[in-house]
Amino acid sequence: MMYQKSSMSSYMKILLLFVIVMSLGAIYKIWPVYIFENLLSPSRKTMDINEMLFAVPVDTKLSSTTRLLNKDVSAAEEEQLNEALAWPAPEEPLSFENSTDPRTCSCFIKNLNKTYFVGDTLEVILVARDQLGNPKRYGGDFFQAKIHSPEQKASTYGTVVDHKNGSYTAKFILLWSGNAQVSIRLIHSSEAVAVIRKLRESDPHKVFFYGYFEHGKKSEKTVCNILETKENCCCAYVDPITQDTWYCGRPPTLTCDKLKSHSMGGYKAKLSKSDENFLRATVTNIEVPESKIQIHITQKSITLDLKKCTPGMKVPVPAGFYLQDHWTSFVCSTKTFSQVSQVTSCLRKKNIYMMGDSTLRQWFEYLVQFVPSIKRLDMQTSDKSGPFLAVDSENNIVMRWRAHGVPIRTSKTIFADLHYISNEIRNLGGGPNVVIVFNLCAHFTTLPVHTYIQRVSRIRNSIVELLQRSPETTVIIKTANTGYKDVYGSDWLTLQLDTVLRKMFEGIAVVIIDVWQMTSCHYSGENIHPGKTVIQNEVDMFLSFLCPA
């Protein structure tokens, strides 16, 4: 449709334009303001209806359900979340000489005992030192701690308390008899944390994506992201329910509605030489040599009074421990599902929806591999982002997994297959045999925290609605894995988002499966995609909530 000159009076032209606009609005549910802007813009001589349908704001006259789903986090709640994320800042200006050197940090046991028993608490004092060997006078270093025994395939998570004066206390509960060794690693100095935090807020496009536009034999590729790079740069894809928006640069000749596929683009963090120094491998994820303290633990009988696994249970620290590669949970009374028949019996007549990233996909793949009767169907979809479907027709088991909506770093996949978790949950009826499992973290670490808070808020609204109409539905949240140590996915960034997720679901009858501790403390070392032993223990936790002891 061309916007051309006419001999009609100005009044008649405006009236005719109004009638056209309102007709289009009625037919296509397009926001009239957008149409006026595009018709009258001197830089836009033509208007493509399909392009508008893909790239316009949704109608502001939303239903009550949609308003609830789009309800933003209140200012008070966001302030509370920001308080929970507060982190001590280093002294300015940042200097590499003043940053923490893990090789020279001091460690010693507080109140050293001659004998330690199972159930005792061990405290280790750590004094951080800078690159010149001087004690630091401020906190903010990011340490992770565990106590472990590779011989016994045993380990548990240790808490680290920052005294904000350069000293730290690592606390461990001793949970098995025999030898044990402390391990405290400097993940990032306080100076490195400051760099990572600055880049998270100031450079959200350090990870970028590609959008693939196709029409006939013609194909064009542009850069995409969750935020606009500059005003009016892009095709905007607005979800009509959640109003989540995805931006792709306008293709040279094709229209916005021709977007077909999505993929990871690349990495382009804007790091200065000084920033790179704080994040280099020699000072990142390095074990403090003096922390390698060995002790012997004497057997002592302790009783675990654990309740049946039910939604809404709080996660203690530590959440459990490994011994002989078996995770004993302190959350509730879990079971080991070592036999195929046990898993089949637990999953019988269950309709399971998994939504998230590749770390949750590992659960789906483990169950398909472990239970021969669960057959994965060839959906002719992406092997990285799905969606996947597996069924056991004899036992009426249905399992689905799909990647969460953009942003997601994945190989080339159909854009329309990437659904927002909140929409997926909103479209489910729920019921006693319906199980929803989701996770959301790793693909948001490079973005401002506010972006993540809003995404989680929409998921939370959908879950609250679901539990109101079907309170017998089981909803399980898998927390974040540890493993990444760089500016694109540092464990510090992950911890911040993990904290937000947990706090936003406090008081809601969902299950929190704490894999942060399970992946952080395992004696084999961290891996964003942990090995079979860790996955098996995670799935055993999952099944213990479906079929409690």
Image (cartoon, rainbow, N blue to C red):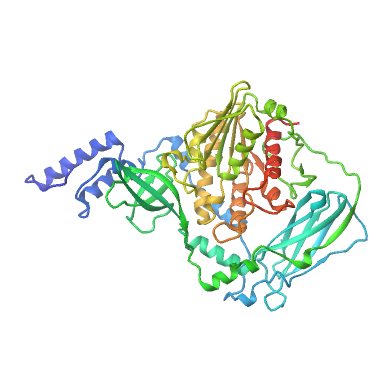
Residue 319 % position (x, y): 74, 47
* Residue 74 visible at all: no
* Residue 321 visible at all: yes
In the image, 498 versus 528, the foreground residue is: 528
Residue 431 % position (x, y): 58, 26
Q: Residue at x 46, y 42 (%)?
A: 70
Q: Where 115 sits versus 35, above or below? A: below
Q: Residue at x 53, y 28 (%)?
A: 429
Q: Where 339 sits versus 209, above or below? A: above
Tell me the quadrant of the picture where the N terminus can be found.
Answer: top left
In the image, 342 versus 36, the foreground residue is: 342
State left or right for residue 534 relative to residue 44: right
In the image, 284 versus 524, the foreground residue is: 524
Which quadrant of the view contains residue 214?
A: top left
Residue 159 % position (x, y): 74, 56
Residue projecting furthest to the top: 394
Residue projecting furthest to the left: 7
Q: Residue at x 61, y 68 (%)?
A: 89
Tell me the quadrant of the picture where the C terminus can be found.
Answer: top right
Q: Where 305 sits versus 480, above or below? A: above
Residue 245 % position (x, y): 41, 47
Which quadrant of the view contains residue 307?
A: top right
State left or right for residue 446 relative to residue 48: right
Residue projecting furthest to the right: 114
Disc count in the image? Answer: 0
Q: Where 34 sits versus 169, above or below? A: above
